Image: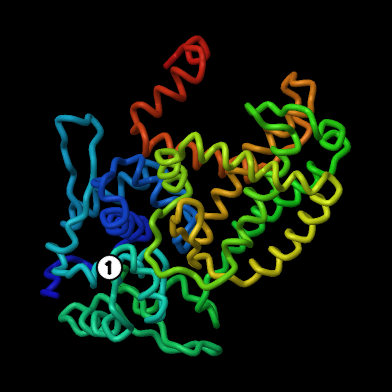
Amino acid sequence: MTNSGDIAFDLTDEELRVLGCLIEKEATTPAAYPLTLNSLRLACNQSTSRVPVVDYSDLDIEQALRTLRERGLTRNVHSTSNRAMKYRHVVPEALGLDVDEMAIIGVLILRGPQTIGELKSRTERIHAFADLAEVSASLEGLASADRPLVVELDRAAGQKESRWAQLLSGATEPVVASPPGAAAQPASDRVELFLQGARAIASAISSPEVADCWDQPSVLDDQLVSGLAGHLARGAVWAVGDYLDGDPPAGPPDVSSAAEYFVTLLGAVTDDDHRAIRERGAAVAALGHRELCRVLGDRITRLEDQLASLDADRLLTVAGGLVIRLDDYLATRIVEQVVHLDDLSRSVSDRSGNRSFTAPAAGEHLAIDVGIEMLLQQRGSVAAIRAIFRDGFAESSFPVL
């Protein structure tokens, strides 16, 4: 690391979040980097791998970008092929950081103080350290520079290991400290939302409406209501427990979000895969309505125990051999719950639009966010705007746009 020059180390929370996201996304989604304002806002406000979770507006991010550019930490990128302005960081040049140091600074900015072990695990998508000694050496280099960029914090009561914090904000003590014993970051909010959806599925499948329509066609092609119920039980609920069995795979993850997971699979799933999915649903349904309800209830109870204290960053190998973080995989299951509960509801209703079963409202909101992110990844911001406001609605609905 070279001297960091005259850059003032008093970045605001907004500036730190923007800078951290640019560092992260350059490494994890290089095809989408530099970032548009919209992509940067989504990155700043995402609910995973961020401490704290924020809700910044475009104006907040534009102001942060303006001052970061004045500080010499970011650049605007003009493109003749894309009218949208894009943004990139210039941290290596401005602060003289190597890729290993960049990975550490990025994680400390986005996730707050970390132990050496946490840093090794959480930097893998940006830079793979060989061992803890390499992480320690990089930290020592950052801490011993003419202008230190990190500091080792005193251990708090109940903590077995010391934590390291970034100093770009100018603070010698972090605003957000890790709680005692916080070597793991439980995915409590996502877990609870997933379990709420699982209970909604159990309630729907056990209803008289589903029992009465068990052997009737569903709204999905070549699938009975029973097969749809089996798919919901297996794919949207107990697959999580199946994938949690055994040791976690080695990182880094193959995908960094629920949207990227779906986009990756959509490009690879064949007709044979769809047929196999239907067959697995039918095989579960072959248990019979009453037995399926009993097994599903038992599975949910087991999942409540399994998920009670797991780290949000715990890795799973799931469909297609993809390695994904637990928190991101739970988001994909919540989307499945929302979509297929609606399918089940329409399959047993009078098909007039009334819904007998619904997922939790927060799950529906998450599914919408994931869908919009997928649209952005696949088609870009301009196409997404047109799909929503032009193709998705009659133009007369938006007479002033």
Label 1: few (<14), some (14–19) or many (≥20) C-alpha neighbours in 10 Å = some
Residue drawn at (25%, 75%), measured in percent from left and top? 149
Vertical arrangement, residue 126 with respect to residue 31, above or below: below
Vertical arrangement, residue 250 with respect to residue 225, above or below: below
Q: Is residue 245 left or right of residue 140?
A: right
Indicate how the structure is coloured in the image.
rainbow
Camera-nearest residue between 112 and 199: 199
Camera-nearest residue between 219 and 188: 219
Vertical arrangement, residue 137 with respect to residue 119, above or below: below
- Image quadrant assignment for residue 378: top left
Residue tagged by mark 1? 127
Camera-nearest residue between 235 and 324: 235
Quadrant holding the N terminus: bottom left
Badge 1 amino acid: His
- Image quadrant assignment for residue 108: bottom left
Image x and y of residue 109, in percent: 35, 66
Image x and y of residue 390, in percent: 44, 17
- Image quadrant assignment for residue 385: top left
